[in-house]
Amino acid sequence: QKEVEQDPGPLSVPEGAIVSLNCTYSNSAFQYFMWYRQYSRKGPELLMYTYSSGNKEDGRFTAQVDKSSKYISLFIRDSQPSDSATYLCAGGSNYKLTFGKGTLLTVNP
Amino acid sequence: EAQVTQNPRYLITVTGKKLTVTCSQNMNHEYMSWYRQDPGLGLRQIYYSMNVEVTDKGDVPEGYKVSRKEKRNFPLILESPSPNQTSLYFCASSWGGGSSYNSPLHFGNGTRLTVT
């Protein structure tokens, strides 16, 4: 089993929709969790970071971690066409990040 | 501007012809890493370096070499490329391996390599 499993998508939603992106992980040693966003022909960039169970909010984005069920989620409220990108979840420990395969999201105007 | 610069952006080569992809960062980061990204497989780490002259294997190191003679540069070397190394390659750097919000991994814009 891959250490980080991510819903493959692709996901297509209308503008303004609430988007839910999900990952599960198997490595209990993961100490922190991240979401990276990758636009076409660009490298990934950090979107959200959390190290504990619970919710972390930043504007329209909410990252949720449930360590008991090893579940990671990213919610996007009021999605915009500019949110169209590939979203990568990642778990980390000891300076090593393990990425999920990524979910391609398209937000249609 | 803080950035990670990879060259070239696109590269087409033939099996067995040695090539080097360069990576340079201007943020004085100690940690640098190479990843390859493939459809259905995601981002996989090839090699990483915690500091000058310190390198270690990632998850998929076979067929690749790296060196870290200077802090800012971390070239990826394919001594004898094969078609299964056709991929999108990313170099990244950070202070602590991307382990904190204050020091995320900074990625370059990728090198698309095709080996025929």
Image (spheres, helix red, strand yellow):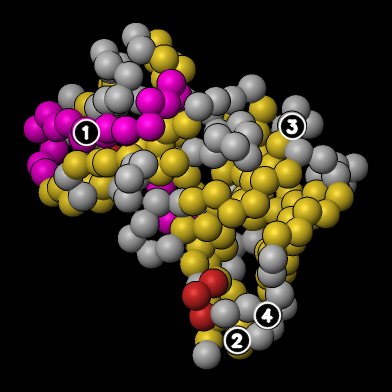
To the question of a shared chain for discs 1 and 3, the answer is: no
Q: Do marks 4 and 2 share a chain?
A: yes
**Subunit that carries the residue with mark 4:** A
Q: Which residue is mark 4?
A: A78
Residue contact between numbered discs 1 and 4, judged by CB atoms under 8 Å: no
Amino acid residing under circle 3 = Gln
Query: Tag on residue B88?
Result: none
Residue at left 27%, top 32%? B24
Q: Are marks 3 and 2 on the same chain?
A: yes
Please report contact status of discs 2 and 1: CB closer than 8 Å, yes or no: no
Magenta stretch bounds: B13-41
The residue under label 2 is: A15
Percent x, y of residue B50: 46, 17
In this rendering, do the residues under marks 2 and 1 share a single chain?
no
User: How many angstroms separate mark 1 from mark 3 (CA)?
Assistant: 32 Å
Tell me which label, 4 or 2, sits earlier in the chain.
2
Q: Which residue is mark 1?
A: B22
Secondary element under disc 3, as helix, strand or loop, is loop
Q: Amino acid at mark 1?
A: Thr
Q: Say what secondary structure mark 4 lies in.
A: loop
Whether residue B21 appears in magenta in the rendering, the answer is yes
- Residue B36 in percent (x, y) is at 38, 41
Q: State the residue position of label 3.
A: A31
Q: Residue at x 13, y 49 (%)?
A: B12
Q: Residue furthest bottom?
A: A109
**Disc 2 residue type?**
Glu
| Image height of A21 relative to B53, above or below | below
Up the image or down, A86 lies above or below A80; here it is above
